[in-house]
Image (cartoon, rainbow, N blue to C red):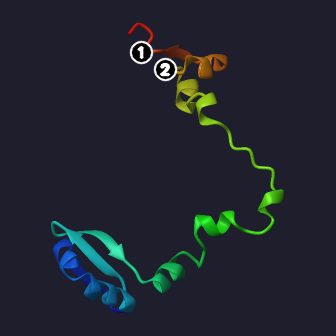
Amino acid sequence: MTVTTVTSRELNRDVARVKRAAKAGPVFITDRGRPAYVLLGIEDYRRLTGGRGSLLDALSMPGLADIDFKPARAHREPPAKAVVHGMMVVTGNIAGFEATGVRLVNPWADI
């Protein structure tokens, strides 16, 4: 496996060369002299991730329609830190949080 290092400027000037280098191994892309990104060929990426597919692949798996999944609505639940630490929630959506018992402040109430 060949490891290549290029600057951001070199990447911008010759993307095709950098893509070819990524087929042979990881390409470290530096920004102001420090490694900032790594470009991998798809096979290296799949090997690193264990061959797992994308989120879209996971969501389109057969049988998922049979799973009862009802995600919580975030705007109807108080932020966990506010409840645990006795803090207040600053929001314009007072009605959405009233039932939680958390202290509420609407900064737009008197505008």
Q: Residue at x 81, y 50 (%)?
A: 68
Q: Residue at x 65, y 20 (%)?
A: 100
**x then y, percent, for residue 4:** 27, 85
Q: Which residue is mark 1?
A: 107
**x then y, percent, for residue 17:** 26, 88
Q: Which residue is mark 2?
A: 92
Type of the residue with mark 1: Pro
In which quadrant is the N terminus drawn?
A: bottom left
Q: Residue at x 42, y 84 (%)?
A: 41
**x then y, percent, for residue 87:** 50, 21
* Secondary element type, mark 1: loop
Q: Residue at x 16, y 73 (%)?
A: 9
> Farthest residue in the top direction?
110
Whether 77 is drawn above or below 110: the answer is below
* Secondary element type, mark 2: loop
Instruction: Give the Cα separation between the discs numbered 2 and 1.
Output: 7 Å
Whether 82 is drawn above or below 107: the answer is below
48 vs 96, left or right, is left
82 vs 77, left or right, is left
First-in-chain label (2 vs 1): 2
70 vs 48, left or right, is right
Are discs 2 and 1 less than 8 Å apart at CB?
yes
In which quadrant is the C terminus drawn?
A: top left
Q: Residues within 10 Å of mark 2 (few under 14, many from 20)?
A: some
The disc label shown at residue 57, or none: none
